[in-house]
Image (spheres, grey):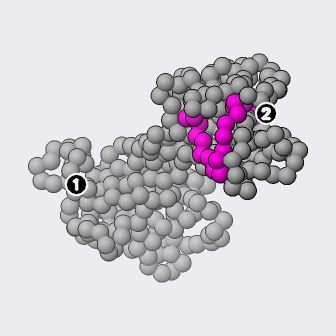
Amino acid sequence: MTQYPQREALPNAFVPTLLILFLCFAAPGFGQAVFDVQTQTAPVNTLSISDVDFVNSTTPKWLFTINIRVLDGGTRSATMEVNASFMFPDETRSVVRLVTEPFAVMGTRTITNLDLGRTIPLVTHTVDQVSKRRLEETALPSGTLPAGVYSFAVTVRDSTSSSGTTFQIIISNPSTVQLLSPMEGDSFVNPFPLFQWQYDGPSSRISVFEKLPGQASLEEAASGIPHLTATVQGTSFQYPSSGSRILELGKTYAWFVEGLTGATGGTVALKSELRSFTVSGNGGSSLSSLLDELERALPQYQSLFDQIRAQGLTPSGTIRLNGSAISTAELMNLLNKLRIDPESVSAAELQ
């Protein structure tokens, strides 16, 4: 077996295979490229220490795949080097370096993180101890690695050349879902409400249930068949006017939102609190709900909202924007637009 010289270990070698953040540069080639190297990563937004310590883990999960193709279609003996680095707030630090023993590539070969140290033995496995301690200090209280950019570099070599690629896993660690509107117990919701919530993950799933006669709690109502379930990108959902069961006047509904986050092994759903609302015949919205929404969108006018509440003012039943009557749903859409892009509305007169 051909012996390949080992490179000098990274300072402060790292123990648990935190194969995270491997931002390295492929070694310069010394001949015409022989391999094409492509990668695929798991759709994750959160990682635990056990997820990335896959060489030592007793229950490792898939995190990335490396596809190697011999350009001339033949068979080659190759070694692979994987380097990782993490972008800490103050610097980017190398974390892990792995080098495999030689293995055969017969035209093409697919290797995952589950193969490293198992079906493909390792010659070198070094970890930076300083980086390890910094990650563990943040991760151990919750078991979740800190949010940030985890960068990987892969280099595949034979005796004449090297080829490589880089990829990143961006961890955001979304944690909670906070419902905004309709407000809890709102009894003046129109039949096509605009649901809104706060969540810092990529997608959410909203579920709406009818609270049937005899059901004593919202939990009981939400244990049945949902009136509507929808997965959305973003943090708002307009109840559709067609294609779904309508919300009936006078009936009460329960709803919640699940924030969807990718984790190794599948999708994790972070569930919000349960809320209820009642559909009103006048299609309006309660003063409390409207004021809450306006305050969130226009915090610079807090003193005006305090004055409205202090004077006990009540809505007339008609909302006008720049002199034209609009529905509650249209007003909620405008407020949502203001939250997302405050510069999108230059001036408006609301009555």
* 240 in relation to 112, above or below: below
Residue drawn at x 49%, y 50% as measured from the top left: 198
Total labels: the figure holds 2
Q: Confirm whether residue 82 shows in the render.
A: no
Residue 289 point in image, percent of width and height: 40, 57
* 136 in relation to 231, above or below: above
How many other residues sit within 10 Å of disc 2, few (<14), some (14-19) or many (≥20)? few
How many other residues sit within 10 Å of disc 1, few (<14), some (14-19) or many (≥20)? few
Question: Horizontal placement of 139 versus 150: left or right?
Answer: left
* 118 in relation to 233, above or below: above
Check disc 2 and report its element: helix, strand or loop. loop
Q: Quadrant of residue 148?
A: top right
Q: Quadrant of residue 227?
A: bottom left
| Residue numbers of the magenta segment | 88-115
Residue drawn at x 32%, y 46% as measured from the top left: 274
Query: Quick one: 338 or 257, which is closer to the camera?
Result: 257
Query: Quick one: 167 or 47, which is closer to the camera?
Result: 167
Query: Quick one: 163 or 138, which is closer to the camera?
Result: 163
Question: Horizontal placement of 294 versus 161: left or right?
Answer: left
* 349 in relation to 28, above or below: below
Q: Which residue is tagged 2?
A: 91
Query: Quick one: 311 or 74, which is closer to the camera?
Result: 74
Check disc 1 and report its element: helix, strand or loop. loop
The answer to if 105 sits in the magenta stretch is yes
Residue 150 point in image, percent of width and height: 67, 39
Q: Which residue is tagged 1?
A: 225
Q: Amino acid at mark 2?
A: Glu
Residue drawn at x 54%, y 78% as measured from the top left: 322
Circle nearer the N terminus (2, 1)? 2
The answer to if 64 sits in the magenta stretch is no
For the stretch drawn in magenta, what is the main secondary structure?
strand
Q: Residue furthest bottom?
A: 324
